[in-house]
Image: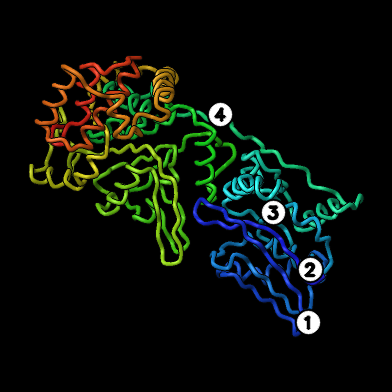
């Protein structure tokens, strides 16, 4: 036999298209040619595969070897094709049975000794294998041990974890009928769903208004901007938001894990755990939204179904912040390059914090501010109006005196707040199938229609504060969440009045 076909998976953003590895052995001067739009990492597979086969005591064919990675128009990157290329060469040369290759898909990078090294995106690839099972039949997926745990979380596809090339060859021989060859056992994830402890909200002294705002934000999926002097607890509050968010659904957990897997940052122990991302204000636009010649997800996608915390918001480059405007609305980010275009999910919950002025003490009760009014205005104007318009809630986090820090109790625990949040979130889900922050214009007209005194209050506030249509709708969404926290079917004046308080201008702080 001089021809063999092995199936693997590529990666194009969140999509993992099937890649067919075709190997042909021909007569002629010995050579090893890779075609099918491989990048540098894939081209280097020639030397890794040659050394791995020889060190595992297989014969490397002294023939003209041609390896085609199809489809040819799909760019191929990373070392995940090492294993299928090696198996294709062995099958084409008759050193392993080729008839069992069609029952599996393979991915893994080979070391020079034949050991398998982990690959990025194993969970995304396993999910793609499970989705294609209806059309291609149920195939197993053979992966390195270090990548098998996350892939096994998909559950709908058999995962086989191998330590090295020899184990894979032995498994294929056993599958072909060799009773002496040991098989690979179907892999089960270890330690998935471990319970992680979040910081407790009770540790934050005082700041009841800010805690109330976080509770509303958690129940409705709203974005929040906290404004206050340094040391008032803004970062502490933000870090405690994941602990009061509703539990993740299976789909949310899978999407979040798949995005993290693309960057090699997912651990099975964090399955169904809300992520908390806090990039430094020196982050570039590509770091925030994703990018690169081979596009990879940025912070807004890594925070998918979790929390993105931007501390010292005005210190971020203004152009960097502006790239978040579209994802805040759509929940997705599309990255276009000359060679490819990829789409990543970005349904994150934005929590931002800032000082009211450069020195940080504008409006402080005991510390005098050294900034001029013009300097305060210039500092606050670093955040554009369109971006501020997309943030649902703005809350002041005032300073506390020494006596207040000593005397004030810690307040409610995260567990108690989380119970109210879960009840309100479940109410919204059962009513409209999504969180209140994701309501469309038609949903707002149907579920949040103001009447009577509520309508008059909204009209007066909108006229006085000069709201845009977006701001008007966001106030109604927040009011709907406040009503859900109180188990109210209709919006009341108190609900809308509280929501209006969260649309105050920065200058009023």
**Residue that badge 4 annotates:** 195
Horizontal side of residue 298 vs 377, given as left or right:
right
- Number of other residues with Cα within 10 Å of mark 2, as a class: few under 14, some 14 to 19, many 20 or more: many
Give the image location of residue 364, x and y in percent.
16, 31
**Residue that badge 3 annotates:** 105
- Number of other residues with Cα within 10 Å of mark 3, as a class: few under 14, some 14 to 19, many 20 or more: many
Q: Is residue 442 above or below residue 185?
A: above
Horizontal side of residue 231 vs 48, given as left or right:
left
Determine the image quadrant of residue 439: top left
Element on which disc 4 rests: loop
Determine the image quadrant of residue 377: top left
Sequence-wise first label, 1 or 4: 1
Cα–Cα span, label 1 and label 4: 59 Å
Pick the residue in front: 54 or 229: 54
**Residue that badge 1 annotates:** 27
Sequence-wise first label, 2 or 4: 2
Sequence-wise first label, 3 or 2: 2
Kindly indicate whether the residue at mark 4 contacts the one at mark 1 (C-beta within 8 angstroms).
no
> Which label is found at residue 92?
2
Element on which disc 1 rests: loop
| Residue at point 36%, 28% (across, down) | 220
Q: Is residue 101 visible?
A: yes
Pick the residue in front: 316 or 359: 316
Give the image location of residue 186, x and y in percent.
75, 42
Give the image location of residue 404, x and y in percent.
25, 19
Give the image location of residue 173, x and y in percent.
85, 55
Cα–Cα span, label 4 and label 3: 33 Å
């Amino acid at each position: 036999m001089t021809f063999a076909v092995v199936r693997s998976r590529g990666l194009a953003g969140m999509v993992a298209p099937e890649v067919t590895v075709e190997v042909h052995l021909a007569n002629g001067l010995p050579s090893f040619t890779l075609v099918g739009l491989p990048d540098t990492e894939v081209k280097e597979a020639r030397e890794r595969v040659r050394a791995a086969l020889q060190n595992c005591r297989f014969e490397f064919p002294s023939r003209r070897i041609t390896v085609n990675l199809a489809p040819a128009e799909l760019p191929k990157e990373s070392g995940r094709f090492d294993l299928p290329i090696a198996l294709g060469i062995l099958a084409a040369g008759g050193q392993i049975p080729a008839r069992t290759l069609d029952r599996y898909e393979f991915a893994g990078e080979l070391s020079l000794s034949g050991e398998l090294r982990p690959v990025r995106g194993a969970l995304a690839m396993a999910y793609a294998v499970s989705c294609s099972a209806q059309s291609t039949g149920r195939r197993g997926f053979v992966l390195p041990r270090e990548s098998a745990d996350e892939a096994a979380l998909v559950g709908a596809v058999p995962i086989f974890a191998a330590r090295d090339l020899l184990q894979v060859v032995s498994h294929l021989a056993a599958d072909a009928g060799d009773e002496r060859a040991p098989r690979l056992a179907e892999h089960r994830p270890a330690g998935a769903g471990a319970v992680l402890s979040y910081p407790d909200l009770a540790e934050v002294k005082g700041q009841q208004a800010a805690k109330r705002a976080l509770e509303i934000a958690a129940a409705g999926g709203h974005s929040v901007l906290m404004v206050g002097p340094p040391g008032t607890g803004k970062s502490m509050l933000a870090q405690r938001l994941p602990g009061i968010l509703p539990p993740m659904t299976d789909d949310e957990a899978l999407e979040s894990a798949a995005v993290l897997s693309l960057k090699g940052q997912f651990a099975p122990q964090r399955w169904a755990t809300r992520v908390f991302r806090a990039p430094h204000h020196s982050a570039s636009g590509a770091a925030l939204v994703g990018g690169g010649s081979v596009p990879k997800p940025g912070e807004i996608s890594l925070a998918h179904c979790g929390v993105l915390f931007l501390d010292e918001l005005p210190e971020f480059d203004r152009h960097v912040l502006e790239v978040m405007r579209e994802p805040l609305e759509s929940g997705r980010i599309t990255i276009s390059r000359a060679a490819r275009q990829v789409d990543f999910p970005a349904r994150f919950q934005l929590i931002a914090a800032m000082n009211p002025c450069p020195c940080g003490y504008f409006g402080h009760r005991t510390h005098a501010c050294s900034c001029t009014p013009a300097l305060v205005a210039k500092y606050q104007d670093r955040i554009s109006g369109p971006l501020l318009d997309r943030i649902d809630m703005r809350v002041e986090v005032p300073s506390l005196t020494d006596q207040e820090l000593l005397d004030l109790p810690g307040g409610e625990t995260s567990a108690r707040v989380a119970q109210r949040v879960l009840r309100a979130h479940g109410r919204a889900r059962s009513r409209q199938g999504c969180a209140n922050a994701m309501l469309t214009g038609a949903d707002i007209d149907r579920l949040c229609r103001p009447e009577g005194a509520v309508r008059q209050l909204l009209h007066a506030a909108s006229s006085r504060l000069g709201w845009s249509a977006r701001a008007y709708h966001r106030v109604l969404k927040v009011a709907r969440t406040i009503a859900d926290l109180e188990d109210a079917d209709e919006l009341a004046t108190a609900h809308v009045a509280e929501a209006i308080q969260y649309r105050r201008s920065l200058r009023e702080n």
